Structures are given as C-alpha cells and as structure tokens.
Amino acid sequence: MLQAKASKKAAKQAKEDALEADKQARKAEVFAETEGEGVGSLGQVSLEVDDEEIKSEVGSTIRI
C-alpha cells in the first residue's frame, strides 16, 4: 500500500515537472525568436522637472 502511494505521488510530481519544463521551454522559444525584444510591456519614464513646482515647494534654493 505504501509503495502504491509513493508511486502515485512520484507520478504526480513527474507530471507537474513535465508541465513546468514545457512552460519554461515555451518561454525560452519565444525569447529566442524575439531575441529579448518585446518581452513584457514597455513604458516611458520622464526625468523632467518642473522648475516652477520645485520653487513653490522648496523655496528659492534647491539642494541635491
């Protein structure tokens, strides 16, 4: 009975491992096809500073 239980557990783990390996293989294939381009969503970051807003918050001097 213990052997049958261990066998079922091992089969379940093997199936989960196979699914995970398949998932990783598909990710690697997509990455290889795009050479890393287009993975995830890209956004834009602006590092511009509004001088008027800083002056009103800080005063006339700005320290960095």
Image: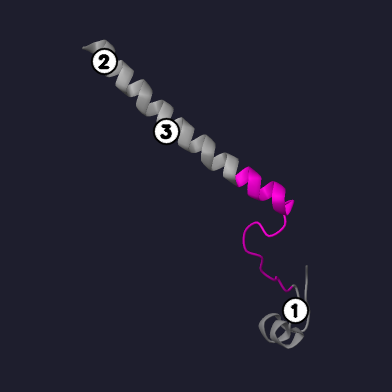
Q: Is residue 28 magenta?
A: yes
Q: How many numbered marks appear? A: 3
Q: Secondary structure at mark 2?
A: helix
Type of amino acid at the residue the image marks with label 2: Ala
Q: Which residue is located at x 31 percent, y 16 percent?
A: 6
Q: In the image, which is nearer the foreground, mark 3 or mark 1? A: 3
First-in-chain label (2 vs 1): 2
Q: Nearer the viewer, residue 25 or 37?
A: 25
Q: Is residue 51 magenta?
A: no
Task: State the extent of the magenta-drawn residues as a range.
Answer: 27-46
Task: Look at the numbered discs 2 and 1 and tell me whether their residues touch, using CB distance below 8 Å.
Answer: no
First-in-chain label (2 vs 3): 2
Q: Bin the neighbour count of mark 1 within 10 Å (Cα to Cα): few under 14, some 14-19, many 20 and up.
A: few
Q: Which residue is located at x 46 percent, y 31 percent?
A: 17
**Which residue of the protein is positioned furthest toward the left in this rendering?**
1
Dividing the picture into quadrants, the one containing residue 7 is top left
| Residue 49, disc | 1
Gap between marks 2 and 1, in whole Å? 68 Å
Q: Nearer the viewer, residue 54 or 24?
A: 24
Q: Position of residue 34 (x, y in %)?
A: 71, 54
| Residue 10, disc | none
First-in-chain label (3 vs 1): 3
Q: Position of residue 3 (x, y in %)?
A: 28, 11
Q: Is residue 12 left or right of residue 43?
A: left
Q: Secondary structure at mark 1?
A: loop
Type of amino acid at the residue the image marks with label 3: Glu
Residue that carries the numbered disc 3 in the rendered image: 16
**Magenta-drawn stretch, dominant element (helix, strand or loop):** loop
